[in-house]
Amino acid sequence: MADRRPCERASGHRKHPIRFRPRPIAKHARIQNHILRTAIMTIPKSQSSILVLGITGLLAVTGQSYASGLQITEQSVTGLGRAFAGGSLVNDDVSAVYYNPADMMLSSGTQSQLGLIDIDISIKTSDGGSTMRLPANLGDLLTKPGTLPVFVTIPATGAPDNGGTNNLVPNGYFAMDINDQMRFGLGITAPFAVSTNYARDWVGRYAAVDSEMKTVDINPSIAYRVNDNLSLGFGVSAQYLDVTLSRALFNPLSPTSDGYVENKGTDWGFGFNLGATYQFDPDTRVGLSYRSRIDYTLEGDATISNYLPGTNGTRGIRADWIAPDWAALAFYKRLSPQWAVMSSLRWTNWSVFKDLQIDLADGSGVLGVINENWQDSWSVNLGVTYDYTPEWTFRAGYVYDQTPIRSAEYRHPSIPDSSRNAIGLGFSYHPDPKLSVDVGYMYISFAKSSTNEALDLVPSSYSGLFVEHLLVDYSASGNLFGLQASYRF
């Protein structure tokens, strides 16, 4: 990999060749101003890259994405212990509001629940041979029209850096009877998030330094019992998205002194969720659930510092992003008074995330388009529970979660996502029939992955002159700890 040229595939064929289009400059006295104008033109595109990285990686606000892509499935501590197998079909807490509102009909009475999951993700990076390609004859290119560039390739500056993070993900639910056939529920969750943090001098700093995404979803739901076997559910979501992204800016006039840009954007989006649950008998049931996509138009500011004269300051930015829809099929079977098994199959429509276009907030132009080319992903969950006594329940589970990023070309350091295997363990303690205290743990093993990306450091009329070929290898693991309390009034 270290011997490949920027944008070159393993086969040796270049996917997107970088072409240099020299722009004649007749008067030497205009050189400095021309460079500054070029740099100013560059900033918005640099900002767009950051916003993309942050949005693309972002938003999972709580540490690197824990489910595939930016998605967080960890919305229940009881679910954490069985690796979320069966979703809310297991009926061991109040999380049906999020997973499948129809499952609320499996319970009765007034219930409330508060949970907190600590997500500790360790990401270790190693430099796979990153290089910088620079023009050795920059002066001639600027002063002599028609001059062709003569490139020199040197090792990229900066060291590998570990980009792990530790974050807390809260959730809260409430459910109550409306009548014998209907229930109302309310959930507050964080369904998408990301947080990766690198040193400002690491080798991939021109791609990403800090990327953080936070979401808050407010989800009222209704469930209706059609008959003794079938229940249906429907809910609406008001979802708030907050993204902060930053990276270093390469300074062609002073390569040893980086600039810095931080992008911030927020928006509200709206969607819905629905579900159906069919109970064959008291011990056997299946559920089907769906959550819609949510469209965002993030608006905010990009702040540039320590960069070229005339470029520092704050300006408005805007970018569209889609939170994907997903569907899940769940199964539950009680084998005996003590043992039960459960499973889930989940599909996420990540193929809606093909690219990200960044615009100036005033509508004066397109800053750039970044190709993401994410693919749909699947996860498979298997779990088991054991009711040791009326006071104690133990659970365990396994999940395989497929990444939507299939190629190193599209794996940004802000979201170094990869497929993963995870094992969950947990227990519940019921000191009395109304109160449940739940503890869960999950260990995640991420597949090793890499970034193989060509970064055009000074895009504009001189696109391709300053290029970093970023080669980074990742190994990651995660430890999740959860504590939850549920109370039945």
Image (spheres, rainbow, N blue to C red):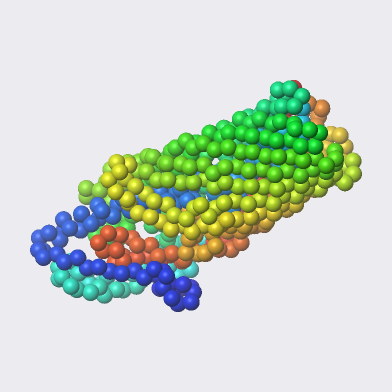
Q: x, y (%) of residue 251? A: 29, 57
Q: Position of residue 175 (x, y in %)?
A: 69, 28
Question: Which residue is pictured at 88% across the width and 37% down the height?
Answer: 389
Relative to the observer, which residue lies in front, 231 or 371?
231
Quarter-of-image position of residue 110: top right
Q: Quadrant of the C terminus?
A: top right
Does residue 124 sit above or below 333 in this rendering? below
Q: Residue at x 11, y 65 (%)?
A: 26
Q: Residue at x 63, y 31 (%)?
A: 221
Q: Quadrant of residue 290?
A: top right
Most foreground residue, 355 or 389: 355
Q: Position of residue 315 (x, y in %)?
A: 30, 42
Q: Is residue 225 above or below residue 344?
A: above
Q: Is residue 91 visible?
A: no
- Write down the quadrant of residue 458 in the picture: bottom left
Q: Is residue 462 left or right of residue 208?
A: left
Q: Position of residue 176 (x, y in %)?
A: 70, 25
Q: Is residue 158 visible?
A: yes
Residue 445 relative to residue 86: left or right: left
**Left or right for 324, reference 22:** right
For image coordinates 81% across by 48% down, the residue present is: 341
